[in-house]
Amino acid sequence: MENQMKPVRGAARRDMARRIENITEDEAEMLLAEYRFGSRNLQCCPACGSLARHYRLQTRRQWRCRHVQCGHTFSVTSGTALDGRKLSYRQLLRFLVHVEASPKGTSLVALSNAVLMTEKCALQNLMKFREALMVHADRAPMTGTIHIDGAHVCGKFRRSNRRVKKIDPKSVLEIHGTSEVKRRLRAINPQSRANQRRAKNKRVLMCLVQVSAEGGAERVIVAMCRSENAQDVNELAKRYIMPGSRIFTDENPAYNELGRCYEHFVVNHSEEYCTPEGVSDNLAESFFSRMRRGQYGVHHGFRPQYMAFYGWEYAWRETHRRSPQSVKVGLMARVLLMPGYSRYWRGYHGGQQRKLRRRVRKELVLPEVASSKADLGSSGEVA
């Protein structure tokens, strides 16, 4: 696999940045054409699907299908998530290089300054990239050793102006708060209207990491859930893990039923991070560490509506963290140039967002066991 290549260190890791430093628009177009079609001389018509040397319209940077019955005119980005783009091909390459060079993610301001575009354009193209990673992710069942863990995201409580001396055991904080939050009981007022509203946004990001032969992370799959419960855990294991595989988890009771179809090993985090036999879920914790650094230092917070997009971005970064820059930029370009328009972000700043606001976009989240009928009817899809 490409993510199992020998690590490249030093200036060699920035090989793609040097390559596009003085690239021309024609060279940038041919490089993207090679990423999409696999060749600089042959093109695949998005209308009829014929792979041939089509007629070149040089002044328009397009091709026309050589088959008379078709005659479709297309460019490198036609029929993809980048269809209708206003950026030049050089800007697209700079966009890919800058996003790749940010291991914890990048902000819209930094991206707009690096590529010379507006923050609105940076938002739309960056979210298209995250959506493409989510749609075209490798969801084949995992084998071997898999680390599983969950992390609470969104719905973070805010400190109150006045400290609370006594906490009601039936309060929102006791029901929905994490151990980190409960250690600061006196600094948070769970009964405030704002914190009660934030409690409804709390989600759990589940992470499944397949261990490589060298001991690192080979592939990462993520899914959004409303809580870390046995029903969702069993459903994820059934979909993404081959029977007979070894699973390492912590002591959470949500994983107790995994021993029926898998070799299940547990590490008690209240006592140790790794057992003497080598049982741990450190690879899943490593993924969450990368995600938290991006949350605190770059994005400053997540929302349930878009959390699945960010989760798959960090899953891709963790999977290909040791690949050279040229390999990762090529993978990013091929994902963005896959056939099919963007479902969520095409025409977002041209009025499409108003339609989405009238009809709220469904979350890509598994339903909770004890959810209400309204929540169960909202979405049952695994991100």
Image: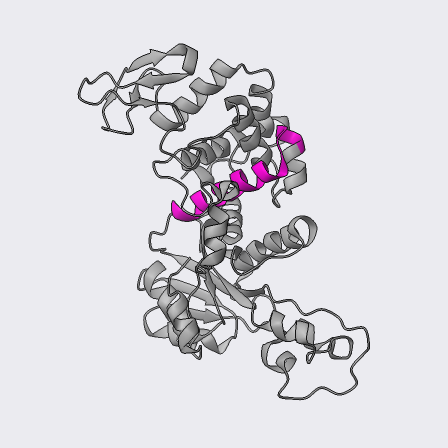
Is 285 drawn above or below residue 372 in the view shown?
Answer: above
Q: Residue furthest left?
A: 69
Quadrant position of residue 78: top left
Q: Which residues are magenta?
A: 113-136
The answer, for residue 137, to whether it is visible in the render is no
Is 281 drawn above or below residue 122 in the view shown?
Answer: below
| Left or right relative to 162: residue 97 | left
Q: Position of residue 228 (x, y in %)?
A: 49, 71
| Left or right relative to 233: residue 89 | right
The prevailing secondary structure element of the residues shown in magenta is helix
Q: Position of residue 220 (x, y in %)?
A: 46, 52
Q: Where the C terminus falls, by quadrant?
A: bottom left
Q: Where the N terminus falls, by quadrant?
A: top left
Depth check, front residue: 71 or 160: 71
Q: Residue at x 39, y 47 (%)?
A: 135
Depth check, front residue: 114 or 246: 114
Is 131 magenta? The answer is yes
Q: Position of residue 173 (x, y in %)?
A: 65, 79
